Image: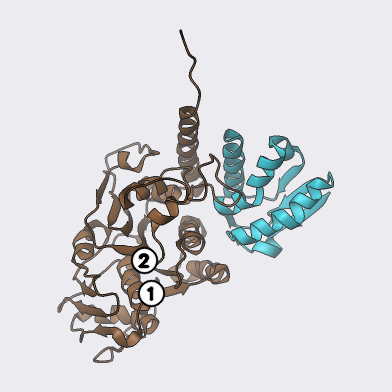
């Protein structure tokens, strides 16, 4: 496997980064980087770390990094988590800042601890923290319950002052969305599986409306909706397919939440290197964060509307003869 | 009547579905089976996920019907938690 860390890879411009990944040799990982500058979304770091954890650490090679911002990788804990030896030791410039370094979460107890650490690490106000805690909890629980990942979830987040956003990455190297959804729905492609996974009320655990005692099929729809209402990016990548919710235009006064993610402003593709597992990246603006209860009202109106429509599809029609 | 103080079990942010399931199976359902009323006390709990509330009460509503809500009361909920409980109750009745 070969990964090149570019000078910029955020959700808006992540497509070239994903497409250049060479995932062909699953026993080796070679990391190279832009010589001048490396700047990336936490989800990119999570992907590199997740790949690194699938192989023996001696088979991970990282070239001598020259970029001025190389200390970022150290600060976010990449070398430590994957146990990578770098050619020249990098001096950690600053330990302060508003970020959550790469963390591997293997079980419920570790998730609970991680969520408790979110507020102090990102220096959030309580009202800003609710959606972030919510997103992390729902996404990591998805990994723990459905992914069958042997290495748990890899999570990282960072605050970006210029845009006043929190950017979050959550990655696993489990079975992927298609296999999970196929337990209940016959999705033929990875993209179709992603579409179903983002549809309210759809879960891989049952076809029953209302879900099981444990799953309602609401988590991913909720997270996509939080990003959408805040006019931010949301990206999900599994197998060879990637779906990206694009930012809504600022002049758009009213955002309508759609049950079908393909009716949202989005981009998608099925020609990406095959990612064994699931990758989710999301941006949350702290400027625009609506009060969480208002967010919930908007989201659940859309959820219930979609459930009603699904239920109506099953109604029998009168036979007129 | 039994009162279940959730803060002691689930902490400030109620998101652990395993704990929600355990509370349902070991406390809520046995109490309802004995025709006891149940109070779910959310005092001091700052937040809850829909998944947590779903794992806590959805199967109770499915098993006993919406009438079971006459026997369950939610105490000390902040506005967000009230909203989330309302949502789960709504969609479970919608899917009956």
Q: Which mark is residue A97?
A: 1
Q: How is the image coloured?
A: by chain
| Residue B14: % across, % down | 60, 58
- Is label 2 in contact with label 1 (beta carbons under 8 Å)? yes
Mark 2 nearby-residue class (10 Å; few <14, some 14–19, many ≥20): many
Residue situated furthest front in the rendering: A321
| Viewer-proximal residue among A128 and B71 | B71
Tint applied to chain A in the drawing = brown
Chain B's colour is cyan
Q: Nearer the viewer, residue A16 or A291?
A: A16
Q: Nearer the viewer, residue A120 or A313?
A: A313
Protein chain holding label 2: A
- Give the residue at the far bottom of this rendering: A88
Residue A198 visible to an observer of this rendering: no
Q: Percent x, y for residue A212?
A: 58, 47
- Residue B4 appearing in the image: yes
Whether residue B6 is situated above or below residue A25 in the rendered picture: above
Q: Nearer the viewer, residue A251 or A3?
A: A3
Q: Give the mark nearer the N terminus: 2 vs 1.
A: 1
Taking the spot 75% from the left edge, 37% from the top edge, the residue there is: B70
- Relative height, residue A59 to residue B58 (above, below): below
Q: Position of residue B65 (x, y in %)?
A: 69, 37
- Label 2 sits on residue: A159
- Where residue B44 appears, as percent x and y from the top left, is 66, 59
Vertically, is B83 above or below B16? above
Mark 1 surroundings within 10 Å by alpha-carbon count, few (fewer than 14), some (14 through 19), many (20 or more): few
The answer to whether A272 appears left or right of B3 in the picture is: left
Q: CA distance from mark 2 to mark 1?
A: 8 Å
What residue is shown at x 32% (from left), y 58% (from top)? A237
């Amino acid at each position: 496997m070969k990964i090149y860390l570019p000078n910029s890879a955020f959700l808006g411009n992540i497509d070239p980064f994903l497409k250049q990944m060479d995932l062909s040799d699953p026993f080796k990982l070679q990391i190279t980087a832009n010589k001048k500058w490396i700047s990336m979304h936490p989800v990119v770091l999570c992907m590199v770390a997740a790949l690194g954890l699938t192989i023996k650490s001696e088979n991970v090679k990282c070239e001598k990094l020259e970029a001025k911002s190389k200390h970022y990788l150290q600060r976010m804990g990449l070398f430590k988590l994957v146990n990578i030896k770098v050619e020249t030791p990098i001096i950690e410039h600053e330990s302060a800042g508003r970020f959550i370094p790469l963390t591997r979460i293997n079980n419920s107890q570790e998730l609970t601890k991680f969520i408790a650490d979110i507020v102090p690490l990102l220096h959030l106000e309580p009202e800003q923290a609710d959606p972030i805690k919510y997103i992390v909890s729902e996404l990591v629980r998805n990994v723990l319950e459905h992914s069958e990942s042997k290495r748990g979830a890899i999570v990282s987040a960072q605050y970006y002052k210029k845009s006043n956003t929190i950017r979050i990455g959550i990655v696993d190297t489990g079975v992927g969305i298609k296999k999970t959804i196929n337990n209940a729905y016959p999705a033929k492609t990875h993209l179709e599986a992603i579409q179903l996974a983002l549809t309210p009320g759809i879960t891989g655990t049952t076809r029953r409306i209302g879900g099981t005692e444990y799953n309602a099929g609401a988590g991913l729809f909720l997270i996509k909706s939080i990003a959408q209402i805040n006019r931010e990016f949301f990206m999900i990548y599994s197998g060879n397919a990637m779906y990206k919710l694009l930012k809504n235009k600022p002049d758009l006064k009213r955002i309508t939440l759609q049950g079908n993610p393909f009716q949202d402003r989005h981009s998608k593709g099925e020609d990406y290197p095959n990612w064994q597992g699931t990758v989710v990246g999301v941006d949350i603006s702290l400027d625009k964060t609506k009060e969480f209860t208002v967010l919930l009202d908007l989201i659940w109106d859309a959820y219930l509307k979609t459930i009603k429509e699904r239920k109506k599809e099953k109604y029998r029609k009168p036979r007129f003869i | 009547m039994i009162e279940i103080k959730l803060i002691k079990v689930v902490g400030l942010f109620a998101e652990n579905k395993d704990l929600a399931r355990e509370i349902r199976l070991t406390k809520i359902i046995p109490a309802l089976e004995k025709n006891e009323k149940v109070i779910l006390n959310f005092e001091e709990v700052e937040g809850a996920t829909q998944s947590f509330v779903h794992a806590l009460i959805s199967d109770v509503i499915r098993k006993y019907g919406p009438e079971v809500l006459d026997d369950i009361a939610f105490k000390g909920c902040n506005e967000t938690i009230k909203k989330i409980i309302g949502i789960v109750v709504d969609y479970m009745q919608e899917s009956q």
